[in-house]
Image: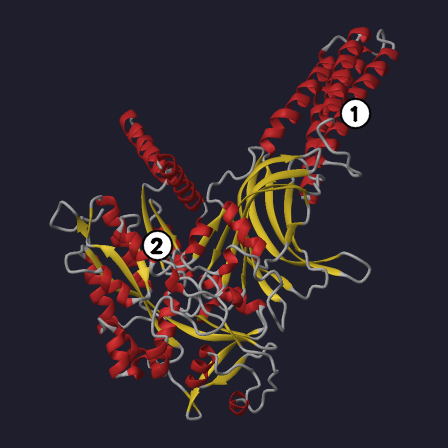
Amino acid sequence: MGLVLVLVLQAALVVADTAAARPAEVALARGYPTWLSTPTFKQAPARQFPITVLTGLHLHDVIDIRLREQDFVALTTLTLQWNDPRLRYDPATITTDYIALEGDDAKQALRNIWHPATIFYNTTYDGTQRLALTVYPDGFVCLKQFSEVTAAYRAELRAFPFDRQTLRLVVAAFDPNNDVFRLAPLSFSTSPEADIVPAAYRFASTTSGLQNIQTSANGFQRTLVFEINIDRQSRHYILRYFIPLFGLLLISWTTYLMTSTKLHDRLKVIAISLLTIVTFVLYLNQNFPRVPYVTALGLYFALCSLLPFVAIVQSIIIDRLDLGTQMDRALRMDRVSLWAVPLAYAGIVAIVTFYALWNR
Amino acid sequence: MGDAKRRAIIGALFVVSLAACSEPSVTVEGAGATAATPILDAWIDTFETERPEVDVIYDPVGSTTGPRSLLLGDVDFATTEIPAAAETTVAPESDVARVPLMLTRVVLAFNVRGLATLRLTRDMVVDIYAGRLTAWNDPRISALNPDVRLPGWPIRPIHRSDRSGTSYVFTRFLSASSAAWRDGVGVGDVVVWPTGGGSIGTLGMTQTLRFSPGTIGYLPETRIAPDAPDVGIVEIVQDGEAAVASFAETLASSLAATDDEDILRTDPARFNHYPIPVITYALFRTEYADEAVARATREFLLHALAESASDDPRLGVRGMPAAIRERATDVVGRIGIASAASPPSDG
């Protein structure tokens, strides 16, 4: 008898525990809508027009932006809102203003009711981590999906490192005939923190809008495009790329201060600086995607690489002069080079700046 | 110039530059009506330009949640369009005061083939929301709009699913227009709607109307997006004439009312004006524990009351009558510190 009593008590505890863990089942026990627990409305509701699905995106954070791979990782919450009159229920059956389900309960309810199938169109990875489903007594449904997504973007690097990039998240509807539901923009918000993008960038603005994407010869898919505009923090790149290269050029420039007769020493210094520049550029290029155009940084590297060659040519010309009779001429050439080369460098900086601004 | 003088000038410049560069030193937090958000945002901008040391944050959580947040001490002021909610909040023993903060209007908007206006009667609006008038080409609507070729689409009335001050004033309008609605559905920030679809927030209503053909809904008159050519505004007619809103009458009724239900029974015409006049109230504490917050809240609300004095078509604000505004200004001006009897001094 005692054993039976213990078993009954254990069974009761298991039931109570299960009920506590599954609010949907508790709700059903109280007389809540049947769609909480059984497949009830799998098909889309009757309609004369496609169902309007208001779609909003909240951007919590852009964790990483990978230049070479041309993708970014973001934490987002996608909100979908629609009406399904079949889900109406008596508000007197609940003590709150709406039924709110999370996690497995939300997933279970979504298996039982129709909901718009959407996808992040340009993502290479979509890790939807949590779901929150809210159903109001009038049949209004709000679904929130918390996700970590990795999305591709096409980097436009002509103005690099003074460039502005646009990261896009494209939400598309799985509705082959475009007749069941239509996405409509609700909102695009970001977390109030200023640094929602990695340190090498600065958040600028957001835009969103509808866009039709051609999916076949005659077919279009309605998508919602959410764009995040970011500016590159160019100071970081000036310190990392521009100033070291300037230092290397400075080394080759010192050859104009060396005695005109020491061609061998001059060439050694120039060769060292030139080889270092080439190594430096080759190393930096490993971090960049291959692009079919010239970037501002690439233009800077190319033009700066010319200066050591100019120094080599100038040294050889001086070496060819008869220093017994043409020493004055050789000294004059060095003096002119002393100010002409910095002037040429200033010209290079001006050209690169103009190119970056033109292409920004 | 002597050293002492030079040092004094440099010191003064240093202090001035520090003041210019400093972050806001006090934050005032408010919460409440979603419909009031663009207006409050604009007023916050002008206030913060004048007073950069104050940071005012407004969270549009709704006309019901805002006052609750104030009572819980989560925010420093709240806004609501629901006088009853405000009355409940302002219990005699409470240290919360209420003043009218802004006057705006709510209109009915619709999306039917890009029509800019459509004439309806109050009874028709009630019937649409009661589910008795279901097609746009219904003979009753066509008779009022003989020049318009209306489609046979179903009418899709949209309401707010969340608790909403705008729903409150709209259901009050419907109750004032129809005793059946008053006794059946009633007035409230959330009611059991006989038919129709839902939306959340003023933005949700705006976007639903914009992108859903055949819909009709209610929203602040300035929230109809200029880039939404499909959305038109309903014109209410009675006995063949356009109804002219008597803003002052409704205002007087709302301000004097402790119970809208009484007025709806005895003199419903007080609340059936269209476009529907809306009073948004500010709720705040009469005493704050922090002197800086007390002063900043007082000054922001005084700034808002000054802004509400005249018409601002851009924001949809109607000028508040001087007598009402002066009384409100007097109440706000008495905001003080919890431990002190007198209000904080300026400066």
Q: Residue at x 75, y 11 (%)?
A: A269
Residue B167 visible in this rendered orientation of the protein:
yes
In the rendered view, does A271 fall on the left or right side of A243?
right
* Eye-nearest disc, 2 or 1: 2
Question: What mark, if any, has residue A306 been given in the picture?
Answer: 1
Q: Is residue A298 above or below residue A357?
A: above
Quadrant of image for the C terminus of chain A:
top right
Q: Are marks 2 and 1 on the same chain?
A: no
Residue A78 visible in this rendered orientation of the protein:
no
Q: Position of residue B43 (x, y in %)?
A: 37, 58
Between B150 and B13, which is closer to the camera in this rendering?
Answer: B150
Label 2 chain ID:
B
Between A142 and B42, which is closer to the camera in this rendering?
Answer: A142
Q: Which residue is mark 2?
A: B31
The amino acid type of the residue labelled 1 equals Leu
Q: Position of residue B42 (x, y in %)?
A: 41, 58
